[in-house]
Amino acid sequence: MGPKATEVIEPVPMTDIRKAIKESLPGLITSIKGDERNVILTLARMWVTASTGEIRSKDLQLNGQYLNYLMSMPFYLTKQERLI
């Protein structure tokens, strides 16, 4: 299978990653209609990467770990607040 990617590719600086996230947001937001699920999941991954510096796989996102992380963040509304 060859060497691991980390053995042959230099790490991308977090400043470059955050810049790419920021620059891709407008296009992502405008493309939400009809693709809401994927856009929301992408936004969640972007938020986690921008706030923690960690790049996580889609598998973690889909099995609920991202949701658990997002629910623990202070910006996430409680169930009662969402109902208001």
Image: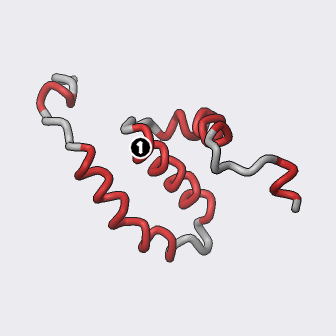
- In the image, 18: left or right of 74? left
Residue 40 point in image, percent of width and height: 58, 57
Q: How is the image coloured?
A: secondary structure
Answer above or below: position of 31 versus 65: below
State the residue at coordinates (21%, 24%).
Answer: 4
Residue type at mark 1? Thr
Residue 46 point in image, percent of width and height: 45, 51
SS assignment at label 1:
helix
Q: Quadrant of the C terminus?
A: bottom right
Task: Choose top left, top right, bottom left or bottom right for residue 1.
Answer: top left
State the residue at coordinates (61%, 41%).
Answer: 73
Looking at this view, name the residue that lies furthest to the front.
Answer: 74
Residue 10 point in image, percent of width and height: 13, 36
State the residue at coordinates (41%, 43%).
Answer: 49
- In the image, 48: left or right of 34? left
Answer above or below: position of 46 versus 54: below
Which residue corresponds to mark 1?
Answer: 49
